[in-house]
Amino acid sequence: MAGLPPGSPAEPLTVAADTSRRLSALDIAMMVAGIVIGAGIFRAPADVARLAGDLPAFLGLWLLGGAIAILGGVTYAGMARSMAGIGGEYRFLAEGWGRVIAGLFVWARMAVIQTGALATVAFVAGAYLATLLPGGELGWALASVALVTLFNLAGLSVSAGTQRLVSLAIILALAALVVAGLALPSGSLAPAAGETPAGDRNLGLALVFVMLVYGGWNEAAYLSGEARGGERALRRGLLGGILLVALLYVAVNLSYIAALGLDGLTATPAPAARIAEAAFGPAGSAVVALVVALAAFSTLNVTTLTGARAMCALGRDLPALAALGRWDAARAVPVVSLLVQGAVALGLVGLGGLARDGFEAMVAFTAPVFWLFLVLVALVPFRVAGLGRLRLPAIPFAAAGLWMLWSSIGYARVLAGQSELAGWLGLGGLALVVAGLPLVLKKAAARSAGSGPARP
């Protein structure tokens, strides 16, 4: 993931894709599982439980999330194969909606999606580190962002082997949790009556949290050029990988429910640590907390690295943000972009710490913007000739995206009306996207003026 990440405006739109065919369907399935499984499954279930309201809805949402990921993966994979080249969502949006919308996506990625993702994952790290060390969730969330930013400023990187070891540790920790949660006496960790926070049922927003945990399926879809057996092998690999993840997620959540009950899960932001302590003692809890923290740091590192490079590319593309484009050749890092990104992420963590739930507040900040652009991507097959075969999976995928977009915006409006900070953050994310429109339009006008008369 070194260099300019997918979605940077500096990337050409006509680079030929690598057409070597070396990945079988099983290879793709295992890669999908490795990409998707992350730290979110250790934190988001508490919010899903609160918003789902009852057990059938809670479990059904995890299965529905897997189905949406499969539909999205098939749609993305088909577009990646048909539009030979690199660029991910930036390329899809440029082909389907034009460079203005594609450029606005890059701005949104820099201003909202990437920095918001950093803050979101930081709260996962904070919740689990707080079970081990003094300092509290907010303190460790802030420290996590600062440490990873300094790590990248030093020009250090995490090897692919280290990333694989972290993924293996996560899978082993999840397997241990499934066994531990189901082995404990049913409901043994459930809270006493009156100790559970009040729920505010919202299935659309609950699905937003579920899809956050399934995040990464869109990256796996870009393996189309390397699938041995073409689209059939790719579809089988995506289906197998996401089904494997969905079954694992359902098993983990069943173990959470078995030990904590739905109300207990709602009231427990670090359920894995609590179950591990009950089953294996303080040492087991410490091991799980460390695994989750490592997984969160791994995600933070990759997000910091790619986000700063996208920000650097945008600085080189937009004169008004030229300072972001500076590159430190000695350390091979975009110093200004790293500092700005880190400062914004720290600010978001600080704001999240003032909200009822910092993790939820950061999801509220990023979700409307993320799903706005994902819906636009889902509609590309209806705007580009030759993609008609993708319309069947794209229709339910776009419908699900619209539901989550509507739910996240509506929830933000309700919370803002109640003077909840999370609501204002949700609306603020959309406002930041609109604020970038003049910069993108100015660049588009300059490009048009420099290209001479339009060709028919």
Image (cartoon, rainbow, N blue to C red):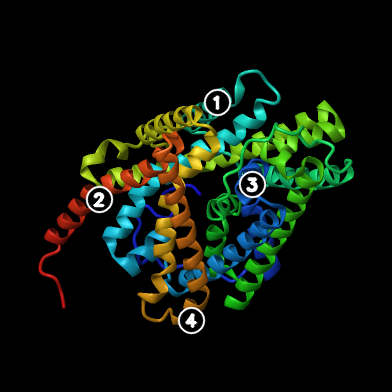
- Name the residue nearer the viewer: 253 or 122: 253
Report the residue marked by disc 1. 138
The answer for how far apart the CA atoms under marks 3 and 4 are is 32 Å
Q: Which image quadrant is residue 127 in?
A: top right
The answer for how far apart the CA atoms under marks 1 and 4 are is 47 Å
Residue type, label 1:
Leu
Q: Dot 3: what SS?
A: loop
Q: Dot 2: what SS?
A: helix
Image x and y of residue 259, in percent: 81, 42
Report the residue marked by disc 4. 389
Residue type, label 4:
Arg
Image x and y of residue 256, in percent: 76, 44
Mark 1, Cα crowd under 10 Å, few <14 / some 14-19 / many 20+, is many
The answer for how far apart the CA atoms under marks 1 and 2 are is 33 Å
* Marked residue nearer the N-terminal end (4 or 2): 4
Report the residue marked by disc 2. 437
Image x and y of residue 438, in percent: 21, 49
Q: Quadrant of the C terminus?
A: bottom left
Mark 4, Cα crowd under 10 Å, few <14 / some 14-19 / many 20+, is few
Q: Is residue 446 left or right of residue 62?
A: left
The answer for how far apart the CA atoms under marks 4 and 2 are is 33 Å
Tag nearer the camera, 1 or 3: 1
Asked whether disc 1 touches disc 3, contact meaning CB atoms under 8 Å apart, the reply is: no
**Residue at screen point 63% across, 44% down:** 50
Residue type, label 3:
Gly
Report the residue marked by disc 3. 38
Q: Dot 4: what SS?
A: helix
